[in-house]
């Protein structure tokens, strides 16, 4: 009799369990955000830090200012080179000044007088040398002076022609090339001068500041690490046996336990997990033979997730 009562009790308990509604299963996940590194392009020491860790900044905000004394020196040199090159180009284009032309005309007048005197002296001696009244040597000396005066006068005529016609086009092009090169060097220095200001590349929250005031920042060294505000997503690990409850594009409710609120999200991606370290669930409950998948859910309202802590736990109901 006692055994029959025990068996009857077991049957009733089994039937009672079968009549209870199925318990809702909860899947855990993590809050994730994309990170970004802010680096410097030129070497310099940290002169000013304008943000603190945890600050929210907008794109273009100044995060820090570098002290780069070498840039100031190179900028002064570049400006001097530009001034010199511009003056040389202007002189090549405009040619000689009025005073230079006046000097050449006065030089030509003096040489013309010498030439005319040598020509007249030579004409007087021609008949005398024919009649052998003067030696040939004297005539040759006067003839040499005449040739010299003529050559000097032709040379000054050529100088005056160059001044009036302007400098050769090749020399103008060379002066223009020097000017362009000097301007390019100045622009390069000005670009380097702008790099002393470290700007935020996107809207983000400053997560880490790697250097302190006075420390040297080398080119390519990460100065700040930030978390992008608009990149919040929820990452869940689910076994293959539960994939039927989720589909890409499906709307789900994501619960944030530590804040006690729910957010609407959209399933954006479901992909296989390649490594055990990528599992988002702290204590996954699944069959070892059951393949795992990573499900990414994007919030419908990204602005509502700005104050949610990264790596915090979130849940969804199956």
Image (cartoon, rainbow, N blue to C red):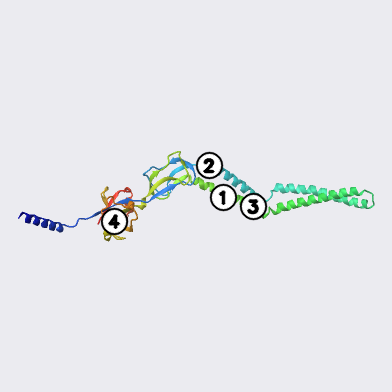
Q: Which residue, given by chain and number where applicable, does mark 1 sit on? A: 184
Name the secondary structure under disc 4: strand
Q: How crowded is mark 1: few (under 14 residues within 10 Å), some or many (20 or more)?
A: some
* Pointers 1 and 3 in contact (C-beta within 8 Å): no
- Looking at the image, residue 131 sits to the left or right of residue 224; the answer is right
Q: What element carries label 2?
A: helix
| Closer mark to the observer between disc 1 and disc 2 | 2
Is there any visible trace of residue 119 in the rendered image? yes
Q: Where is residue 237 in the image (x, y as percent from the top left)?
A: 30, 54
* CA distance for labels 1 and 2: 18 Å
Asked whether disc 2 touches disc 4, contact meaning CB atoms under 8 Å apart, the reply is: no
Residue at point 88% right, 49% down? 140
x, y percentage for residue 318? 25, 57
Q: How far apart are marks 2 and 4 (CA)?
A: 57 Å
Mark before the other along the chain sequence, 2 or 3? 2
Using the image as rendered, state which of residue 289 and residue 122 is in the foreground: 289
Nearer-N-terminus badge (1/4): 1
Q: Where's residue 66, x and y in %? A: 47, 42
Q: Classify residue 2 by image quadrant.
A: bottom left
Q: Which mark is residue 70?
A: 2
Select label 1 or label 4 by which is in front: 4
Mark carried by residue 174 = 3
Is label 4 or label 3 in front?
4
Between circles 2 and 4, the one closer to the viewer is: 4
Q: Quadrant of the N terminus?
A: bottom left
């Amino acid at each position: 009799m006692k055994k029959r009562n025990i068996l009857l009790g077991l049957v009733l308990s089994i039937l009672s369990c079968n009549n209870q509604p199925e318990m809702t299963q909860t899947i855990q996940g993590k809050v994730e955000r994309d990170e970004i590194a802010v680096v410097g392009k030129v070497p310099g020491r940290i002169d000013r830090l304008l943000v603190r860790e945890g600050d929210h900044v907008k794109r273009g905000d100044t995060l820090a200012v570098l002290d780069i004394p070498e840039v100031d020196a190179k900028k002064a040199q570049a400006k001097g080179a530009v001034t010199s090159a511009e003056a040389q180009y202007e002189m090549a284009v405009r040619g000689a000044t009025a005073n230079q032309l006046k000097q050449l005309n006065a030089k030509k007048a003096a040489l013309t007088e010498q030439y005319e005197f040598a020509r007249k002296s030579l004409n007087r001696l021609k008949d005398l040398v024919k009649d052998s009244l003067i030696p040939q040597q004297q005539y040759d000396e006067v003839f040499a002076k005449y040739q010299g005066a003529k050559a000097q006068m032709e040379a000054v005529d050529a100088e005056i022609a160059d001044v009036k016609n302007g400098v050769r086009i090749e020399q103008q092009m060379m002066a223009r090339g020097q000017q362009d090169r000097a301007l390019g060097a100045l622009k390069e220095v000005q670009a380097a001068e702008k790099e002393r200001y470290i700007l935020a590349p996107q809207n983000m929250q400053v997560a880490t500041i790697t250097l302190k005031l006075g420390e040297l920042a080398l080119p390519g060294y990460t100065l700040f690490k930030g978390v992008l505000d608009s990149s919040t997503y929820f990452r869940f690990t689910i076994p293959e046996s539960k994939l039927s409850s989720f589909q890409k594009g499906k709307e789900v409710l994501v619960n944030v336990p530590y804040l006690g609120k729910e957010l609407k999200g959209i399933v954006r991606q479901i992909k296989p997990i390649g490594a055990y370290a990528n599992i988002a669930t702290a204590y996954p409950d699944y069959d070892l033979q059951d393949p795992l998948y990573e499900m990414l859910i994007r919030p419908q309202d990204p602005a509502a997730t700005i104050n949610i802590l990264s790596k915090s736990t979130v849940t969804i109901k199956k």
